[in-house]
Image: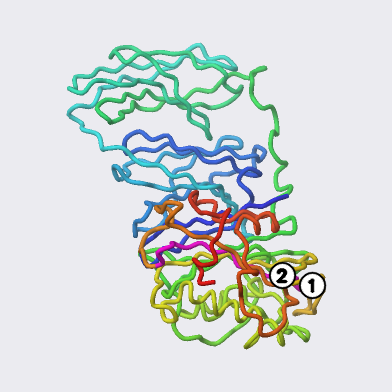
Amino acid sequence: MKRLLTVLLAGISAVFASCGDDGAEKGDTWFLKPEAVVSGTTAEISCRTKFADGVLTESGAGFVYTRIGAADGYFDAEPVEVSGNALSCRLSDLEPETDYLVYAYLELGGAGRMQSESVSFRTGTGSDPGNAPAFGQPAYSEVTSSSAVVSCTFSYQGAEPVSEVYFLYGTGGVSKREAVSAQPGAKSVRLSGLDASTDYTFRLCVAAGGKTYESGEAAFTTDAGDGPGPGPNPGLTKFSGWPEHGDYHYAYHTISDFKVGNYNARNYTVCYSAENHGPVWVAAPLHNCYVTKSGNRSYSQDPDVPAGIQPASKSLADPYNKGHMLGNRERSRTAVMRRQVCYYTNIAPQHSGTFNTGGGAWNNLEDVIDKYWDATKNSSVGDTLYVVVGAYYKTWTDSYGNTASPKKAAFGGQQAGVPTMFYYAMLRTKNAKSGKSVLRCSREELQCAAFVMSHAMQKGHKPSRSDMRSVAEVERLSGFQFFTNVPNAPKDTYNPSDWGL
C-alpha cells in the first residue's frame, strides 16, 4: 500500500518558512481532498475520509489552517463537527482578500498523526452591513430518507445587483449548492439524493457586488430507510490497517525551546519501520536559523514511537556507525533540537569506513547538500531547502553497477535493517534568496531534484550527475509521494546545473 508524505510548506515568514511538514497516510487511501466553500470572509471546510463510523472523534480529528506567507503561524480550527466518516468546520472572520491553506488531520496517539492533502483558498471582501440583505429564519419540511424541502426569506435594499442566490447545505464532510432565483422574497428548494439517517445543515446565501451574505444556519435529520446512503461501515474497521498497527509508525516533532511567534517551531517528521527497526524517511526544512555550534550528543528512544521496536541503546555492531538522517549539526541551536535529532528513529546503520566518515560517499553528499541552504558556506543562498532523507531496504544496483543486498546489524538489542541505498529528495526556490514561500511560487520559480547513493559506494566518491534522479522517480521507487502541498513543484524533471553539477 502506498503511503503519502504530505509536506506542508507554507511560508511562516521569509526566515522561518519551515514549520509544517508532516508524514501521513496517502490522501486517496485515508482522506479525500478537503473542500473549501468561501463566502466573503467565511470558509466552510469539509473533508470525507474512508474510515468507518466511530474512528473519527471530535477530540482526535480536526483542521489546521494558516495564512499563506504570513508570520502568525498555524491554528487549530474550532469547533470541528464529526459526522460518520467526515469532518467539517467553519472558519469565520478571516482576513479579506487573503490566501489561506488548510488540511485535515487525525491524531494517532503516540504514533503521531495522519493528515490529508492541503487545499488553498482565497477569501473575498468583507461585508458592508449597510447594504447587507436581511434574512428570515431558515426552515425545513417534507423530510424523507433521501430528500427535504428547505426555505428562507430575504429582503435587499442595496445598490449593487444580486448576482446569485443559493442554499448551501451539507453533512459533516461536504457542502453543496442548490441555486434559486435571484429576486428578493421567499426561497425554497427540494434537496434530493440525501443519505438516510443523516444530519444536514443548511443556510441561504446571497451574492451581490462581489460579496456573499449568509442567513443563520438550520439543521434537520433525514429519516431512516432505503435511501441512497453508503450503508453501514462503508470504510475501514476501526483501527484496522492504521499505521501504528502495521509496519510504519509516524512521529512529528516540534521544538519547545525555539518559537516562531507564539508557536513551537517544527523540527522534523519521521516514518519508522517496525520490521527494519529503522527510519524509512525523515522530512525536514534546512535553514541557518536552526544552526549554531554543534552541541553534545545524548542518544535516546523516540517517545512518540513504541519503545519495543526501537534500539534500546546506542550500541551498534561493526563495521557500522550511527548515520543520522537529519544531521546533528543541522539541528544544533537548542537543547531540544539536539536531543530530538539523536532519537534512534532518526538513525540508520551506515558503513563507518566507506560511507559515513570523512571522505565517505554519503559524507561527501552531505557536504554538497549543505551548499544548497547554508549561507555560511554559500553566500548566494538563504531560502529554506526542504528535504526528505530516505532509506531503502531492498536490493539496490546503482548506475555504476554497485549492488547492495539487504543485511542486518545488531543495534541496541534489535536486529536492525541495513539500508542498501539512501536518498535525498529536495525542493527549493530557484532564486535561492527570494524570501518567498514556495506555495506562492510558480513552477518556473521552483526546482526539485533527488540524489540516490548506494550503500556499496566506494570511499572518495563525490556526487555527480549520475547520482541524480527526478523526485518523481524516487517516488515511484519508494512508494511515497513528496511535497504534495506544493502543486507547482516540478517533481517530474530536474536540471543538474541548477544544483551546481
- Image coordinates of residue 257 in percent, x first then y, are 44, 74
Residue lying at 59% horizontally and 57% vertically, measured from the top left: 23
Q: Quadrant of residue 126?
A: top left
Give the CA separation, mark 1 to mark 2.
8 Å
Q: Mark 2 points at which residue?
A: 421
Q: Is residue 339 above or below residue 16?
A: below
Tell me the amino acid under the disc marked 1. Ala
Answer with mark 1 or mark 2, whichever residue precedes in sequence. 1
Residue 103 magenta-drawn? no
Tell me the amino acid under the disc marked 2. Met
Binning the other alpha carbons within 10 Å of mark 2 as few (below 14), some (14 to 19) or many (20 upward) gives many
Front position in the image: 198 or 266: 266
Q: Can the viewer see residue 389 in this picture?
A: no
Tell me if label 1 and label 2 are in contact, CB under 8 Å: yes
State the predominant SS element of the stretch in magenta: strand
Secondary element at tag 1: strand
Secondary element at tag 2: strand
Q: In this view, does 61 lie above or below 135?
A: below
Q: In this view, does 53 lie above or below 311?
A: above
Binning the other alpha carbons within 10 Å of mark 1 as few (below 14), some (14 to 19) or many (20 upward) gives many
Residue 429 magenta-drawn? yes
Q: Name the residue under label 1.
A: 404
Q: Is residue 427 above or below residue 35?
A: below
Quadrant of the image containing the C terminus: bottom right
- Image coordinates of residue 199 in percent, x first then y, are 53, 27
- Image coordinates of residue 305 in percent, x first then y, are 66, 65
Q: What stretch is highlighted in magenta?
A: 417-432
